[in-house]
Image (cartoon, helix red, strand yellow):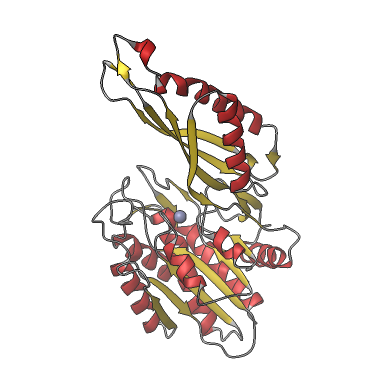
Amino acid sequence: MEQDVVDLVARLVEIDSVNPSLVPGAAGEGEIAGFVADWARRAGLRVEVVEETPGRPSVVVRSNRTGTGRTLLLCGHLDTVGHAEPLGARVDGDRLYGRGAYDMKAGLAAALIACREADRAGIGGEVVVAAVSDEEHSSLGVQQVLDRLTADGAIVCEPTELTVVTAHKGFVWTEIRVVGKAAHGSRPHLGEDAILRTGPVLVALDRLNERLRSREHPRLGPGTLHASLITGGREESTVPDLCVLTIERRTLPGESVADVERDVADLLASCDVTATSRTTLSREPFEIDEEHGFVGEVVAAVGAALGRPAELAGASYWADSAFLAAAGIPTVLFGPPGDGAHAGVEWVGLGGTVECARALLATAKGFCR
Ligand SMILES: [Zn+2]
């Protein structure tokens, strides 16, 4: 099994699957979805390709049921971001380098091998691997897949350094338009400078960010915000009539989009500016009660497979887990170790990826009996 895991990670990393919504003209999931479907069919697994959005397929792989046991869903995304580490798998010691190795082709390979091995072991229930498109942009894949399947428990195999992740933040993008009045630069008293008026808004946002620090989630720390985009002005000698500022707020479990919108509205009201704001994209935070039976089952199986106690943790990033949890499926994240997601140098630990596959298989054997 060890060599199969390593070989599969390398094959997946060698296939270009840059998300075309991030990089226009990029390869997308077509080739890698075809590879995963062929691999699964050859392994004797059942395969369904879900392609509601042309060119953006997801693949659902199922083990063969021998009884009435429960269904475990393992979820991984097929797409990668575009910049950073070039394509191609390069192995150096225990590390496999390449774009998407860590985020998250290694986790996907571990899930597929665990599904195949659970099938060979003749589990009564089912292991379903959802290899989904577009996680790095709009999560089209997981939403389309969830329209046609459910499960008794789910593990998102994003890289977690072999910890069992029970929470991650959500995010809200807000566009703020501060409106001024254009005038000739020699007669500024006739205009209203939209860029200067944005100054107090930025100061107020910085203060709000500090206030957020007073509430900490035990696994995630405080919510945060940052100013991500700003644009305004027309030319040097014109008082600007518009400044557009986009902020990203990372939310804790329990914080809603409405909470963020109210905070921004209150803040703008306190700044004495003419401004509007709107939410351009939001994603829910994710949290599962650590006393939930599913968490206990995963922790026990992972601990037994690794030969050491499984650690619980929070993840700094957002993942498709929020959609699975919203669909009512008890969910955790568990995946391999490495570094460099979305960065210039990306690698995954091969020994850790094999351990990840073993732990997923142990969980499946216990959960899907
Ligand atoms: Zn990812």
In the picture as drawn, the residue positioned furthest to the right comes out as 291
- Give the residue drawn at x 42%, y 28%: 179
Q: Is residue 120 above or below residue 35?
A: below
Depth check, front residue: 126 or 247: 247
Outermost residue, bottom side: 66
Q: Residue at x 69, y 38 (%)?
A: 216
**Position in image of residue 195 (x %, y %):** 40, 22
Residue positioned most to the front: 190
Q: Quadrant of ligand 1?
A: bottom left
Residue 36 % position (x, y): 37, 73
Q: Give the quarter of the figure containing the C terminus.
A: bottom right
Residue 75 or 161: which is nearer the viewer?
A: 75
In the displayed structure, does residue 70 sit left or right of residue 7?
right
> Can residue 334 be seen at all in this image of the molecule?
no
Q: Position of residue 142 (x, y in %)?
A: 47, 66
Taking the view exactly as shown, the residue that stands out farthest to the top is: 186
Q: Position of residue 171 (x, y in %)?
A: 53, 46
